[in-house]
Amino acid sequence: MKKLFVTMFALLSVAAVSAQSEVIAKFNDGAKAVQAKNYASAITLFEQVIDKGMDSEDNTVLNCVATAKKYLPVCYQGVGLSAASQKNYAKAIEYLTKAADTAELYGNTQAKQKANMILAKVYQVQGGEAFNAKDYATAASVFEKGYAANPRNTEMALNLATSYCELGKYDEGMAIYDKICKMPADKYAAAIAKAEANKTLYTNNKVASLQQAGDFDGVIAMADKLQATSPALAEKIRIEAYNGKKDYAKIIALGETAAAAQANDEDKSSVYFLVGAAYNAQYNAGGNKDAALREKAVATLKKVTAGASVEAAKAALAGLE
């Protein structure tokens, strides 16, 4: 019995050595595959190394397992990049997602971030084809996935926000633009400037549609939402809404605050024109008898020095002076 035990122990030892040798051999073959950029083969070999060697007590095998875990995400990434170069986006996304997931599983934060950055670029290219064709619904559905992978890809984030706005999803678009505007200005200045410009463009479009429908209270509600993130724009469209309602007292009450919030002379002038016109309207409504209202109208209209309101201000002043 003792002899049998010794024999069985010897067999087990031989089997263990054989298993260790197999793991090491597969690891070496996997390393050669990586060097040859044969990433698909390397994936199979490294997965076998991890599966067969993870419970080993041999340090050499454990080192092979650790290194396989390190390079497995790189191999998935390699297959994904190759697929992307052939415009096989489905395969590229599948393998780049595996790269990110495997990196996360094995605690490789840097590899995960890199895989997600590349994954986002693939989504950006894929969604860009639909975006350029003005298929904004498809573009948005693709960009959403890319944005989730890497929200710091500002070009794609801008396209996602634009897609939302073109689909009439104003609030969703503004939310993305606002996130871009909160990014570090020293690194993302161009993207922030574009986001601010697009916010103004699509807000003005939204305001115009509400004004055309006579929904001035809807414009005021928009202004209230924008106040925290875009105070200048909020103040300007609020004044315009009260002008649509012909609420001249409210325009006058809000005028100086709205003008002070504007960042350039053109927008300041636009606000001052509405305030001056409000004073003028009240002056006319009183039978042109209140000299104080006339003086305020003249003083305010003289502050209109830039932009599209200049000529209208001059015409109003000619009627008052």
Image (cartoon, rainbow, N blue to C red):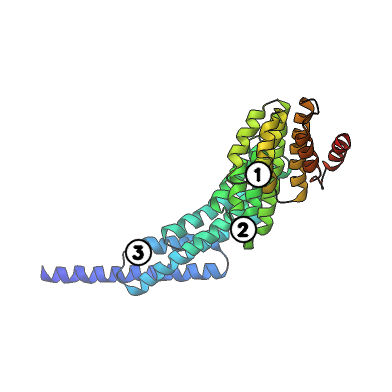
Left or right of 223, for residue 197: right
Residue 40 visible in rendering: no
* Residue plotted at (41% across, 64% down): 49
Q: Which residue is mark 3?
A: 54
Name the amino acid, label 3. Answer: Met
* Residue plotted at (58% across, 39% down): 225
Q: Residue furthest left?
A: 1
Which numbered disc, 2 or 3, marks the residue that appears first in the sequence? 3
Question: Closer to the camera: disc 3 or disc 1?
Answer: 1
Residue 14 appears in which quarter of the rendering?
bottom left
| Quadrant where the image shows the C terminus | top right
Residue 85 appears in which quarter of the rendering?
bottom right
Taking depth in this image into account, of 164 and 17 the one nearest to the observer is 164
Give the vertical position of 161 relative to 217 (above or below). below
Q: Could you classify mark 1 by the number of other residues whose Cα lies within 10 Å: few (under 14), some (14-19), or many (20 or more)?
A: some
Taking depth in this image into account, of 304 and 139 the one nearest to the observer is 304
Q: Which residue is mark 2?
A: 82
- Residue at disc 3, secondary structure: loop
Give the vertical position of 147 relative to 209 (above or below). below
Task: Locate residue 295, reporting x and y percent.
Answer: 78, 39
